[in-house]
Structure formats: structure tokens, C-alpha cells
Amino acid sequence: MTYIVRPATSDDLPGILLIHNDAVRNTAAIWMDEEADLADRAAWLADHIDHGFPVLVAVQGHAVLGFSAYGHYRPRSGYRHTVENSIYIHPDARGRGLGFALMKPLVAHARADGHHVMMACIEAQNTASIALHERLGFREVGRMPEVGRKFGRWLDLVLMQLMLEA
Ligand SMILES: CC(C)(COP(=O)(O)OP(=O)(O)OC[C@H]1O[C@@H](n2cnc3c(N)ncnc32)[C@H](O)[C@@H]1OP(=O)(O)O)[C@@H](O)C(=O)NCCC(=O)NCCS
């Protein structure tokens, strides 16, 4: 599969929206039921850019195959050295290495920007995401039973952590 990974621009927003809303409708990866619209995703991209946080896309021509990003883990100032990542691949492009290809430069960006820790908060049945993060060196540091609910079932949260500094 031929694609390039690059920073997202506003031209990528329709593709990002499509992937985001598919994950809202069909997965327990995003713990919400309300789909987003273009204005919401534009505000999300602008907020990341304003804070110097990256949003990366994998694209084939004009088609967005997936995106990765990180932002504040929690808003209070004491957490300022910790970031939390997001990674979403188009349903037709999963399992072909794109998740890894979008996460590697994201982690490198966080290291280069001097962040200390990257967190991933993953629904416990999401074996693909847990496997992807383990491959990147993340380790499970916590498990919170039944803190979420979607599709008529309780969701457990797995906290995974990567130390960015040696
Ligand atoms: C989770 C997700 C990002 C993984 O991306 P991907 O492109 O499908 O994953 P990759 O092909 O890069 O695989 C990365 C690693 O995860 C493993 N993996 C991928 N899919 C897997 C699955 N269904 N079950 C177990 N392991 C899996 C791969 O084997 C690979 O490890 P390896 O190289 O050691 O074999 C993608 O499936 C996705 O977007 N899912 C829906 C949204 C989501 O869950 N996002 C994460 C929220 S925390």
C-alpha cells in the first residue's frame, strides 16, 4: 500500500471526520454516541495547532487512511509534561501497518518536544490497540473496571504509559 504520512491540513478534515464518525458509530474506542460535524473537527485541529500539538495523517492521493494526534492528558498545569495520544485508521485500511506508521513519528515528535510521558487510554476489549501500543513500548499501568458504558455494556479502561525520556 502506497501512502505518505504528513501533518494534517484543513483539506484533510472531511476524511478525518468520516473516520471519527465511523469509530463513534461502530466501535467502543470513542466513548460517546454523538457524531461530530466538520466545524467540530476544524476546531479540534485548530486547537491542536494553537498548542503546538501534532495531528498527522496517512494519505493516498487525497484519501485520508488514518490519523494520529496527541494533546493534554489532563488540563491542570501539574500534568503539563504528560500527553495522551489518539490513533484512528479507516476501517478498510486496518491491520496493514498504518497504525504503527502513524504512531512512530507521533512518539518521535513528543520526544523532540521534551514531553515526559505519553498515555493511551484504551477500552479493554480493543486487542488491536493494546497490541499496537505494546509494540511501541507502552506498558499497562492501570485497569479501571466498568467506568464507561456503550452499546448496552460496561466498558473497562486500560491505561498504558510510555516513558519518553531515558
Ligand atoms: C487500533 C488501530 C489503530 C490499529 O491500527 P492498525 O493499522 O490496524 O494496526 P497495525 O496494522 O499498525 O498493527 C500494529 C500492531 O498491532 C497488531 N494488531 C493489529 N490489529 C490487531 C488485531 N485485530 N488483533 C491483535 N493484534 C492486532 C499487529 O499485529 C501489529 O503488531 P505486530 O507488528 O507485532 O504484528 C486500528 O485498528 C483502528 O483504528 N481501530 C479503530 C479505532 C481504535 O480502536 N483506535 C484506538 C483507540 S485507543
Image (cartoon, rainbow, N blue to C red):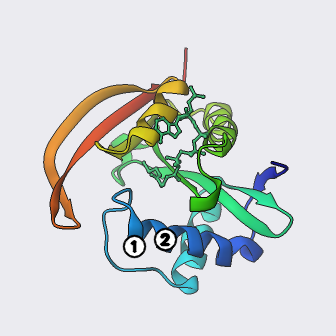
The structure residue drawn at horizontal position 25% and vertical position 44%, both measured from the top left corner, is 157
Q: What kind of element bears circle 1?
A: helix
Marks 2 and 1 in Cβ contact (< 8 Å): yes
Tell me: residue 91, above or below residue 78. Answer: below
SS for callout 2: helix
Q: Residues within 10 Å of mark 2 (few under 14, many from 20)?
A: some
Residue hosting label 2? 22
Q: Locate residue 84 relative to residue 63 in the image: left or right.
A: left
Apparent side of residue 37 relative to residue 6 in the rendered image (left or right)? left
Would residue 16 be seen by someone viewing this image from the given angle? yes
Q: Which residue is mark 1?
A: 25
Residue 90 position within the rendered picture, expressed as x and y whole percent measured from the top left: 60, 61
* Residue 90 visible in image: no
Left or right of 109? Residue 159 is left
Q: CA distance from mark 2 to mark 1?
A: 5 Å
Q: Give amino acid for label 1.
A: Arg
Relative to 115, residue 74 above or below = below
Image point (67%, 45%), residue name: 98
x and y, in percent, of residue 27 in the image: 38, 61
Q: Horizontally, is 136 left or right of 62 in the view?
A: left
